Structures are given as C-alpha cells and as structure tokens.
Amino acid sequence: MSQSKNDAAWEKLFNTHHIIEQVNNNGVYEISAVNINKQREARLMTKFDHHIQLPTLFKQNNFTIQPNSRGTYLIGRFVSYQPILDDESSDIEEVSFPTHIETINPENIYSESAALLCAFNAGIISRLLEEEVSLTVLGRMSTGRFSYFINDSQRGSPYEITVNNSQLEIDAGFEGQRGFALVEAKNESVQDFLVRQLYYPYRLWKSKTTKTVIPIFMSYSNDIFSFYVFLFEQEHNYNSIKLVNRKKYRIGSSEIELPNIVGVLAQTVIVPEPDDIPFPQADSFSRIVDLLTQLHGATMLSPDDITTNYAFDFRQTHYYTRAGMYLGLIERHQSRDQGVSYTLTPRGATIMAKRPQARSLALVECILEHEVFNQTLRLYLNQAGRPTPEQVVEIMNMAQLGLDKDGSTTIRRRAGTVLSWMDWIMALTRR
C-alpha cells in the first residue's frame, strides 16, 4: 500500500531537519510553516484532529504537534488527545424540529455546521445546558498570548508551551445567562479528539467573559447527536480536562423495530460475491455510514481527502472504501490528472438521499444481499442471540469464500467484521 501525501512529505522533513534527534535531545522541535510549505501546504500537513490521522513517523516516535504561533509549530511527545468512550446503552432523548423551518433539513445532515444548526434550532443545546442560549460566536480568530502545561509521555514533568497569536477556529459558541458553551463538532463517530480544539478557545474566552466557559465535544453519526461536556480542572493545565456529562439526542423517532428487519431479510435476494473486491475488513458499520454521508455531501473524495479530513488513517481509508464498494455503494475512479477518487454509485446516492428510517433499512438490505451476512442474521434470529465467532466461521467456510487459504486467523478476523455489522443491524431496533 502506497504512502499518503502527508507521510511522504513528513518523511522528507524528518530527514532534512533531523527531527527525531532534535526531540530526543531537546524535548521539542520547533518547525515553521514556511519550511513545512516547502513539501506540502502546512494547513494539510498539521491537521490531525484524531490520533489515528498522525503520520507514520509521528506514531512510531510517539510525537504530536501543537501550534505556538500563527507561523510555527512544536513537535514533541505531547499527550494531545482525549479518548471518547461511547456508551451504547445510554438513553437517546427524542426531540422535535420546528415545523416552520424550511432552509435546514434535519433528515439530510451532511456537514458539521448543518448538524450544529439543527441541534440548536431543535432546542438540543438549550436542553443540554439547562438554559436558553443564543448562537453568538463562530469561525476563525486569534488566541492572543498565554502559556500552558502539557504532559510529555516520556518526561517526568509537563512541558510548558507559550502561545503567541496562534490561529484557532470555533465551530460554535452558545451563550446563556449563566454560561458560555464552546462546541467542537464532528460529523462522524470518533474514538478521540484533539483537546487543543477546545482548550485554545477555552483559554481565549476565559479571559473575555465572566460567565462559566463550558467546553463541549459533539459528534453526529447515524442520525444521533452525542454530546460530551467537559471542564478543565486547572486553567493552565491542558491535560486537566474532565468529562462531567454525556447526552444523546435524536430529532424525531427511529421507528425501526425488529419486524422491519425481519421483513427486509425475508424479501432480500442474494447476489453473487464480487470477483474483484475482497471480503470486508471494516469492523465499524457506523463508520461506513459516516463515509457514505461524507461522500454524499462532497460528491467526490480522494484517499488523501478522506484520510486528512475524517477519522481514518491511510489503511482504514482503503478498508472502508473497499467495504462500500463491496456493498455496491461506492465506486472508484482513476484518471491521469486527478489520480484515485471515490464517489457514490447511483444506488448509493439514492439510498443516502432517503429519510433516516428508509435509509437505514436500505443499507440493511445491501448487507443482507451477501450470503454470509444473510445466513448469520438468520442464525442470530433463530437462536435469539448473537452467534459465536466459530459459528460465523462455519458459515463462511460453507460459502467457500477462499478466506481460509492464509490460515485460521484471517477468516476469524473477517468473522469479527460480520458480527460487528450484525450488531449494527440489531442496534437499529434498540434506538
């Protein structure tokens, strides 16, 4: 598998500037946007909203990167990311959307700004904060000057960083009588986020308002708004972030029950396995839906677009686009001028334009058109319980997919993918 553009460019910068040696000797290495731009645009080379997006050399050396001015960055072994632990058993509050609003459609949300506006206009933000709020702040601005301490994964003491007018971007700020909430939004499910995206705005607005500044992370995925409310226990400590509340909301009702799934299973016709696309190895079907959502909103994406802008690394981009192709929902294009790119197939575009309930059931049908998934769901329903990996392996062997040629580990890993997709289907009835 070839390198991403970021990997290739950072490899050249590491070699030119001896970055590993510099960090090992001095704890950090400061690099300018001017030097980064010599290889690739700094904006693209430093945008790592999630740990998985870090270039290979960063991961291998436990490095992350933090801006300390508008034109410079520090590379070090900083603890920059905060895990997000989803609680699938938590209740989902259903809210209605104002019927007089026509310019935003909560059934077709394909951007972070649209997700935030829908949440705000549906009253979700006010519910979460337990007071009426107004949308008052968004967009790019300067941090001003401040210092903070950030944990170093190898040093015994935190490292102090001084920030001097670095650029930040706020997705949305909501002000009420008591508090001012800063929201960082992602239009996908994630496993972590870059604390800086909340901490830098927090430090800026802590100095500008007497109200309580409330850092919030929001993800919108599979029609669910998930909110994580944090506080910084120590203003000058980047890693003092603490989760204090977690809520989930949905606009309208999912209206999917087990008989709906059984009905799709009964009417689905099995199709032949594709000859030129491998059996899926993308374990999270929710993230496949996220990718389909991004493609529906963007029309066409390159592998680097997907890796840079969403919570995928280069390998996962390969796995998840192939999974979409396996289902007949994504197609791959290649041209001399633009290289590789991905779009939705006509069927994929039709499905993603449907209302949430119909869209989910259409995606279930796409899964169940494949024999292994069809037979696994039948077993799931017949025995009224989740099949074991061994049972799925037996179904896969009977389907003669040829996955056992590399040994038992390969087919067991693919069985894990099958079971995770079954979990997604069954979870539709529990929302």
Image (cartoon, rainbow, N blue to C red):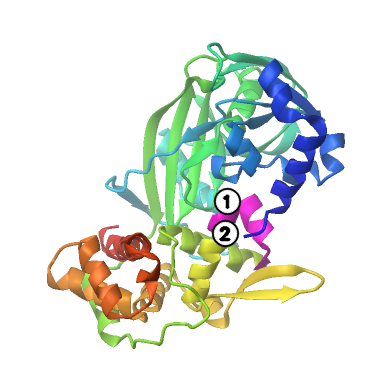
**Image location of residue 325, percent across then percent down:** 52, 74
Label for residue 313? 1
**Residue in the image at 49% along x and 19% along y:** 240
Rendered residue at 29%/68% (across/down)? 256
**Position above or below: 372 against 298:** below
Magenta segment: does it hold 58? no
Answer whether residue 133 is visible to the viewer in this image.
Answer: no
Q: Position of residue 339 (x, y in %)?
A: 75, 68
- The secondary element bearing badge 1 is classed as loop
Residue 314 in magenta stretch? yes
The residue nearer to you, when weighing 23 against 307, is: 23
Q: Which mark is residue 187?
A: none
Question: Picture quarter containing residue 243?
Answer: top left
Residue 93, position as x, y percentages in the image: 33, 49
Residue that label 2 marks? 317
Q: Are marks 1 and 2 in contact (CB under 8 Å)?
A: yes
Callout 1 amino acid? Asp
| Helix, strand or loop at mark 2 | helix
Identify the residue at the far top of this view: 157
- Using a 10 Å C-alpha cutoff, classify the residue at mark 2 as few (fewer than 14 neighbours), some (14 to 19) or many (20 or more): many
Quadrant position of residue 266: bottom left
Q: Nearer the viewer, residue 417 or 268?
A: 417
Look at the picture and state if 146 lies above or below 398: above
- The quarter of the picture where the N terminus appears is bottom right
The magenta segment is 300-316
Measured Cα–Cα span from mark 1 to mark 2: 6 Å
Q: Is residue 376 visible?
A: yes
Identity of the amino acid at label 2?
A: Thr
Q: How many marks?
A: 2
Of residue 160 and residue 107, the one placed in the foreground of this image is 160
